[in-house]
Image (cartoon, rainbow, N blue to C red):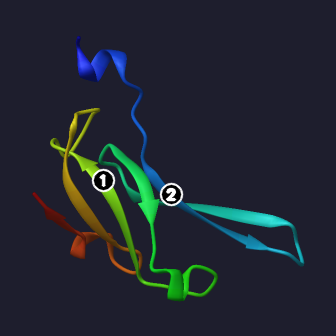
Amino acid sequence: MDYEKDVPLTTLARYVVNPATEAFEKRLLSSRHVEFPSVSPLVSTKKHRYVYVSAGAKADGSSPTAGVLKVDTDDAALSQVYK
């Protein structure tokens, strides 16, 4: 199996909706292959800074899960990978 060819790339994005104008903005939080995004239940419906996802081994392209990525939604450069 060619993982990069056979498995579609999934990334993490945040959508911000303005109810008054019905406009929305899409912001890419991670271009790494990620799955199963999660936040603490204490902040799930509130503004929060961190999102945790299972992350692919490579920084770009599809790759098998190899760790957890802590995504900083304020500054993506501060995101950390735990293998």
Disc 2 crowd, CA 10 A, few/some/many (<14, 14-19, 20+): few
Q: Quadrant location of the N terminus?
A: top left
State how many labels appear: 2
Q: Quadrant location of the C terminus?
A: bottom left
Q: Nearer the viewer, residue 35 or 47?
A: 35
Which residue is at the far front?
41
Q: Residue at x 43, y 53 (%)?
A: 36
Disc 1 crowd, CA 10 A, few/some/many (<14, 14-19, 20+): many
Q: Residue at x 45, y 66 (%)?
A: 38
Q: In which quarter of the view is residue 74 placed?
A: bottom left
**Of callouts 2 and 1, which one flags the residue occurring earlier in the amino acid sequence?**
2
Q: Secondary structure at mark 1?
A: strand
Instruction: Residue 75 in the image: state x and y as whole percent.
Output: 33, 77
Mark 1 belongs to which amino acid?
Ser
Q: Nearer the viewer, residue 60 or 1?
A: 1
| Tag 1 residue | 54
When the figure is inspected, residue 63 is found, relative to residue 49, above or below; the finding is above
- Residue 63's mark? none
Instruction: Residue 18 in the image: state x and y as whole percent.
Output: 79, 75
Instruction: Residue 50 in the image: state x and y as whole percent.
Output: 38, 78
- Residue 13's mark? 2
Q: Is residue 58 left or right of residue 36?
A: left
Mark 2 belongs to which amino acid?
Ala
The Cα–Cα distance between marks 2 and 1, rounded to whole angstroms, is 15 Å
Q: Nearer the viewer, residue 28 or 54?
A: 54
Q: Residue at x 41, y 75 (%)?
A: 73
